[in-house]
Image (cartoon, rainbow, N blue to C red):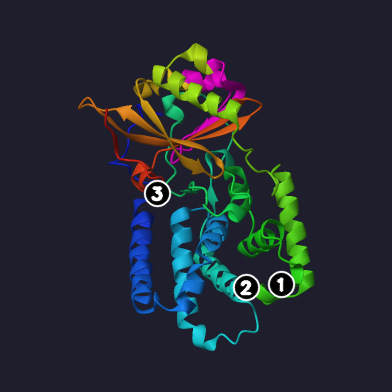
Amino acid sequence: MSSVRRVGPYRYPNERRRNDDEGRRLTVTSAYDAVVESAAVTPAFEELESYRRELLAYCYRMLGSPFEAEDAVQEALIRAWRGAGRFEGRAAVRSWLYRIATNVCLDLLKGRERRARPMDLGPAVAPVIENLNERSEVTWIEPTPDPADAVVERESIRLAFVAALQHLPPRQRAVLILCEVLRWQASEVAELLETSVASVNSALQRARATLEAASVSVDDQAPALGEAERELLARFVEAFEAYDIDRLTALIHEDATQSMPPYDLWLSGRDDIFTWWFGPGIGCKDSRVIPTVSANGSPAFGQYKPSEDGGHEAWALIVLELSDGRIEELTFFLDTERLFPLFGLPPRFET
């Protein structure tokens, strides 16, 4: 977790793919900025922009990355604005935008390996440094800040659910999200995908079976944080910063899990987690932890590890899953260079 050697500063496992994606992102953003400059003042463009939040949530579920989702939404809005003259009004603007966004996502997913979590790749392993590996061929599920729109917030964006969606073929994925999450009618989805209602129902049945096999439900949403949960999180921050094993033991489930993308190692059981924390991960001792906006419906924190200059440097975005008054899952996302700005976290902790 903390004594792990990075290959370069905040290096992603597949740097070439990352550079390609960032180049494409610049192209999409430049095109979008040009559209905004010429069209932002018009009521038509403002109407298109009003769907941005819900489109982001939809594209995130399709793609498993908030950065790709932003690219997809910008591209969808560009296509919509440029094609507005051909829009005949036979469908609602919302349906038309979802059709465009779906096609953008399907284009992005062509020929790509699915995004994954470490748990998707194999069983838990022993908490030893030899089991810590980067997988250059794997593209990881990335967390997203919770949407601000109250309607969208009720829709499931839990990490486990988004990961399960990636097991579905892209068109099945779209069908399940539109029907089960957004509650579209099969006839509406059939029109959007230019297929038959029977085909939509068949795809939906297969998608449901896949999710059921993964023990994931569309309705598996994070519970609202009450006073007890907020107290639990405050106690976790204090105990983690103190690296107090006794206090941490009282807060974490015995069968809890931990993962650390972009490494494929994941741990099952509190004993193995503590063996890692007080062994290979001992460099996290004396860390500082600050709360940030929720990620995928779950509490999230910025972790800052002690640095050689005496300060604290960004180390991980910690996302916690809670159940029955304790922590059941800890995910340490180590790509802080990309994720910390997204979550409004500074690159250093200044005391």
- Circle 3 sits on which residue? 342
- Circle 1 sits on which residue? 188
In the picture as drawn, the residue positioned furthest to the left comes out as: 309
Spatial CA distance of label 1 from label 3 is 34 Å
303 sits to left or right of 76? left
Asked if the residues shown at circle 2 and circle 3 are in contact, with their CB atoms under 8 angstroms apart, the answer is no
Spatial CA distance of label 1 from label 2 is 8 Å
Measuring 49% from the left and 48% from the top, which residue is drawn there? 144
Spatial CA distance of label 2 from label 3 is 28 Å
Q: Which of 109 and 334 is in front in this view?
A: 334
296 sits to left or right of 8? right
Measuring 55% from the left and 24% from the top, which residue is drawn there? 232
Q: Report the magenta residues as a range.
A: 249-275
Q: Please check the rendered image and state whether residue 22 is part of the magenta-colored stretch, yes or no.
A: no
Q: What is the x, y in percent for residue 151?
A: 61, 55
- Circle 2 sits on which residue? 95
Q: Earlier in the sequence, mark 1 or mark 2?
A: 2
Secondary structure under badge 2?
A: helix
Quadrant of image for the C terminus: top left
Asked if the residues shown at circle 1 and circle 2 are in contact, with their CB atoms under 8 angstroms apart, the answer is yes
Mark 2, Cα crowd under 10 Å, few <14 / some 14-19 / many 20+, is some
Amino acid type, callout 3: Leu
| Vertical order, 197 against 160 (above or below) | below
Please say whether residue 347 is visible from this viewpoint. yes
Residue 227: name its quadrant.
top right
Q: Please check the rendered image and state whether residue 259 is part of the magenta-colored stretch, yes or no.
A: yes
Mark 1, Cα crowd under 10 Å, few <14 / some 14-19 / many 20+, is some
259 sits to left or right of 306? right
Q: What is the x, y in percent for residue 266?
A: 52, 32
